[in-house]
Each structure stands twice: as C-alpha cells, then as structure tokens.
Image (cartoon, grey):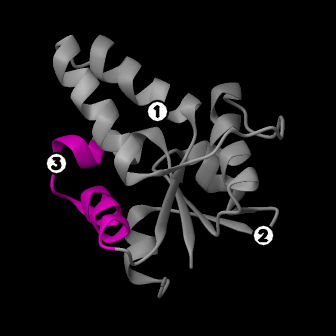
Amino acid sequence: MTRVVADTNIIISAIFWNGKPYRVISKGMQGEYQLVTSPEIIDEVLTKLRNKFQFPEDKIEEQANILMSLFHMIIPTTKIDVVRDKSDNKIIECAIDGKADFIVTGDPDLLNLKEYNGIRIVTANELLHDYKVR
C-alpha cells in the first residue's frame, strides 16, 4: 500500500478547511493509502494549534487523539540535514524511516527538492490529481 507523510501545514489546513489538504487526509482515512507521521510532526501540529490558533487545551488533546488514530506512528532514527529550514528535516526523516512513497506539503523548501531517496515530494493537488495512489 502507498504510504504518505503529510507535512504540518497539510494537517493544519485539513483541520480548519475543506480544501485539497482535507481531501488528502480524508483519502488516507478511507484507506486509499496509509498516512504516516512521527511524534515530532504531531508535536509541531499541536504547538501551532496552541500558539498560533489559541486552541484550548481540551481541544488540543482531542486533536492529538484524532491524529494518533488516523496516522501510522513511527519513531524515526534517521538523521539528515538537507533542507534550508532545519526543522523541516523531520518530515523527510519520518518519510525515510516510515518507508513513505510521498511527502505532501505546501512548503516551497521541501517542494524544491522534488524527490529525496525515491520519495516524491508533492503538493496536495499533485497527489490528488497527478498520481494514482492506492
């Protein structure tokens, strides 16, 4: 089965809006592919919900539980340094150790790579329309 790592910006967008990032997550929920994440990615999502969007703690805990049930959690051991924004390396590390086929992101630094170690780095639109994932 195809494995997909969703970047923090895709997960946040899916929580708030019904656009393409939401469809990416929904298709994973429906079993069209497996969503893969790591504790570091989940932590970043929850931190943004808390600090940027002022989510109350009970809603943050609720989101954490939802994310933990939707995504296959892996603990990356690989360490790399290939992205200008060092905090984005965790996305690629998760994809490598999670044996992902795709990273879905809106981050230009990651998108500029296009591919890393055989893992395609694509936008939500590209995953939904250009690749027939299953």
Q: What stretch is highlighted in magenta?
A: 13-30
Q: Which of marks 1 and 3 is nearer the N terminus?
A: 3
| Residue 13 seen in render | yes
Instruction: Please state which amino acid type lies under the numbered disc 3.
Output: Trp
Lateral position of residue 57 relative to residue 127, left or right: left
Report helix, strand or loop for mark 1: helix
Lateral position of residue 121 relative to residue 133, left or right: right
Number of marks in the rendered image: 3
Percent across and percent down for residue 51 are 31, 11
Residue closer to the observer: 7 or 78: 78
Q: Distance between the residues labelled 1 and 3?
A: 18 Å
Identity of the residue drawn at 56% across and 76% down: 2
The residue at which mark 3 appears reads as 17
Mark 1, residues whose alpha carbon is within 10 Å: few (<14), some, or many (≥20)?
Answer: many
Pointers 1 and 3 in contact (CB under 8 A)?
A: no
Q: Which of marks 2 and 3 is nearer the N terminus?
A: 3
Please name the predominant secondary structure of the magenta segment in the image: helix
Percent across and percent down for residue 124 are 40, 63
The residue at which mark 2 appears reads as 118
Identity of the residue drawn at 38% across and 82% down: 129
Lateral position of residue 130 relative to residue 77, left or right: left
The residue at which mark 1 appears reads as 42
Residue 19 shown in magenta: yes
Quarter of the image for residue 59 reads top left
Percent across and percent down for residue 125 are 38, 69
- 103 shown above or below 82: below
Percent across and percent down for residue 53 are 22, 19
Q: Earlier in the sequence, mark 2 or mark 1?
A: 1
Residue closer to the observer: 124 or 108: 124
